[in-house]
Amino acid sequence: MTSTAPFGARLDDVVVRFGKNRRMLPDGTLVKDEASTALDGATVVIRPGTITGVLGRNGAGKTTMLSLLAAFTRPTSGTVVVGPEGAEEDPWENPWITSGTQLVRESGDLMNDEKVSTSLSYYADMRPDWSTETAGRLLDLFEVDVRKKPSALSRGKRSAVGATVGLAARAPLTIFDEVYLGMDAPTRYAFYDELLADYAEHPRTVLLSSHLVEEVERLFEDVIVIDRGRVLLAEPADEMRARGFSLTGSKDAVERLLAGRRVLHRQQLGTTVQVTLEGALEDDELAAARAAGVEVGAVPVQDLFVRLTDPRGVPS
Ligand SMILES: Nc1ncnc2c1ncn2[C@@H]1O[C@H](COP(=O)(O)OP(=O)(O)OP(=O)(O)O)[C@@H](O)[C@H]1O
């Protein structure tokens, strides 16, 4: 256990706009930059003591949301609270909350001009539940030489240091924002295994954003999908998986089972058709599908995510 109960979090109608700055052009003209809206009325609850996947297409607002929780950014409007259940507080300039929140970004947030060991000592001092034993073991596993400066490490090794910081900190709210970048497949899988094992022994709240959905979806208990600054869905991963199913079989047999259903995706190979549909089959429909030689399958979270956030909408 960490010494503090896992943190939950809540965003209520949060808007974040960037860049309404005035700028002087070389000819002396004053221009006002277009504001860009990163979050546009985002409302979500993050359950304490879960591993939650944060999914969204490029520019959807994931990093902005995670930065709000770690008090790296402030909302333009709306409220953000973080903390143990029933004692959540605004994280902004709130040392009690921020000392319990570890955000790991792609950059690893290491001191560039110092040895990696210096950054690790800094995190060890800052995080009340820091595990020196875990840090040492993971650095050995990832084969990181902590006597080097971050600039002398490969991108994958820098990410591995970030992953190590995130796990060794044992923070009640631990956030990994695309921490896998640059890591090769064996290192990423080692990280996922370590995350699950450490989480089982030391329950806390983990948020994980990743574009490698197929790889990480097995870790998720909850999933948040962000689409163009809004929360499209936030629910247990099993509920998300139950949002759809696939049918594979001959075109005619599959077509007969489509009636009235929303088709999320369709592909055809010769006379065989595979469709992804929203909802679930009733028992009699399932029996009819089997009798017609149509295979009924689950849909990976990756596919549902891609279809549900398709900017062209879903085919009718
Ligand atoms: N500091 C900033 N200044 C101006 N615009 C910003 C800033 N940070 C983010 N944005 C804009 O806000 C939107 C959301 O960005 P954000 O980084 O949160 O998305 P993301 O879902 O993490 O994307 P990606 O998957 O590509 O990393 C984007 O349009 C981005 O250009």
Image (spheres, rainbow, N blue to C red):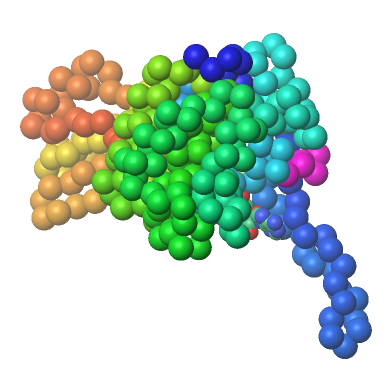
Q: Quadrant of ligand 1?
A: bottom right
Q: Residue at x 77, y 60 (%)?
A: 19
- The answer to which quarter of the image holds residue 288 is top left
Viewer-proximal residue among 216 and 137? 137
Is 123 part of what is drawn in magenta? no
Q: Is residue 280 left or right of residue 76?
A: left
Q: Residue 87, how many percent across, how many down? A: 72, 14
Q: Residue at x 47, y 56 (%)?
A: 148
Q: Is residue 258 visible?
A: no
Viewer-proximal residue among 181 and 78? 181
Q: Which residues are magenta?
A: 73-79
Q: Residue 253, how many percent across, how many down? A: 14, 37
Q: Is residue 296 left or right of residue 25?
A: left
| Residue 31 vertical placement versus 151 (above, below) | below
Q: Is residue 214 left or right of residue 157?
A: left
| Residue 83 vertical placement versus 70 (above, below) | above
Q: As drawn, which residue projects farthest toward the bottom?
A: 27
Is 74 part of what is drawn in magenta? yes
| Residue 65 vertical placement versus 50 (above, below) | below
Q: Residue at x 69, y 11 (%)?
A: 86
Q: Residue 249, how many percent across, how many down? A: 13, 40
